[in-house]
Amino acid sequence: MDEQRLRIAVIIPGGIGTGKNNIGVPVMERLVRLLSGDFDVTVFSLFKINKDYTPIGFTLIDCGNSNSILKATTFYSSFKAQHQRKKFHIVHGFWALPSGLLAVITGKVFNIKSVVSVLGGDAISLPEINYGQLRTWLPRRLVLWCLKQADEVICLTQYLLDNLKNAGLTRNDVKIIPWGIDTSLFTFNEKSLSHPVKFLHIANLSPVKDQTTLLKAFKIIAHGVTSHLTIIGEGSAEQVIKKLANNLSIEDEITFKGLMPYEDLASHYHQADVLLHTSLSEGQSEVVTEAMSCGVLVCGTKVGLMYDQAGCCISVPVQNAEMLGHEVLKVLNDAERMHTIKRNACAWASAHSIHWTTEEISNLYKFLANPEGKTH
């Protein structure tokens, strides 16, 4: 064991070594792998890890169990054993509940500095679709207590931080660190507008992504300009969405591609003219960041990164399909404005790549471990 390297414990609810083809949460896995270049990283997964997955550069410990009490017990015993061997300097929970809460509690028990990353549903209240940890009293109180007690708190976007402040968060030292993407994979591609105009939507097909607004907006767009929409993703709402496309008489202008390997997405961005993204809420939205990096015009609802970076996209209030449809048609007829937005977006994505994110979190770890700048 390298005594000169800071030892970081990361707690995740899942997302590494999980899902079909181990796809998990690709950006989170990439971030952990990059951090492991500078730190000794041990990841505790609260979700069962696929047996055919092998971590690269970091230690991955499976604490998954369908029983919450057994899961917590397994985590605690695993953490204690690893800490006795390694002596962690920092424990970092990804998402406030349950990982961030566990990070704060374990930090207090073992006298370790704690970091909590707020990434999406932990800063949202959408009771109409039964989504978000802020919508009911107990989870909201646990989130706010956890964020108050953590040594450092990171939010992906100002959008999330504003939601938390509205819910009662009072601390004023929260860091905004978006998750960048691999700009060597999602490269800028300058291209003229296609005919028909190629629209792209990449998301889990679920109520929070609000594909109802997506299709209603696309119907308005398709009525004004010859267009085609490609939808990549799968989920519980797939049949409902396909039925709506038929009811709106736009099924011939839509191709459903299903789930796709992460590495194959760049080619679809490079072929697309416009990303349509109409979520009710987002922590950030990696697909928005990827599209920005690739030179695709981003149009959607004012959530996540589209809330923070208004000059890099066309954004409208959630569920406003009519406004979105007309705003998209307007920008398609304004080549200079479209060019400016795409260039702004690409510049932002380039400046905030995955390597920038890694450096920001690395600097936070180093400061937290040595606030007075002493050599470790």
Image (cartoon, grey):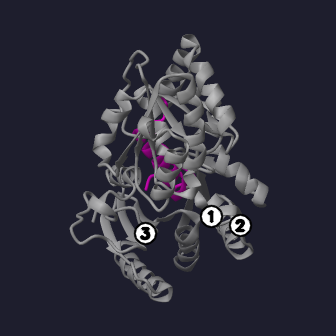
Residue interval drawn in magenta: 349-376
Q: In this figure, which residue is indicated by the disc labeled 2?
A: 135
Instruction: Name the spot of residue 188 as percent of width and height, x first.
Output: 38, 25
Q: Quadrant of residue 21?
A: bottom left
Magenta stretch: includes residue 331: no
Amino acid identity at mark 2? Arg
Q: Is residue 365 magenta?
A: yes
Task: Tell me the number on the disc at residue 88.
Answer: 3
Identify which amino acid the numbered label 3 is placed on: Phe
Q: Quadrant of residue 108?
A: bottom right
The amino acid pointed to by label 1 is Tyr
Q: Residue at x 43, y 35 (%)?
A: 253
Position of 177 compared to 162: left or right? left
Q: Is 104 in front, or is 207?
A: 207
Is 266 in front, or is 233? 233
Mark 3 vs 2: CB contact within 8 A: no
Residue 257 % position (x, y): 34, 46
Q: Are marks 2 and 1 in contact (CB under 8 Å)?
A: yes
Callout count: 3
Q: Is residue 260 left or right of residue 298?
A: left
C-alpha gap between disc 3 and disc 2: 34 Å
Callout 2 crowding tier (Cα within 10 Å): few <14, some 14–19, many ≥20: some
- Report the residue at 51% width, 40% height from top: 249
- The picture places residue 12, in percent across and down from the top left corner, at 45, 66
**Dot 1 corresponds to which residue?**
131
Majority secondary structure of magenta residues: helix
Q: Is residue 226 above or below residue 145?
A: above
> If you read the primary sequence from the N terminus, does the residue marked by circle 3 or circle 2 appear first?
3
Image quadrant where one finds the N terminus? bottom left
- Name the foreground residue: 103 vs 289: 289
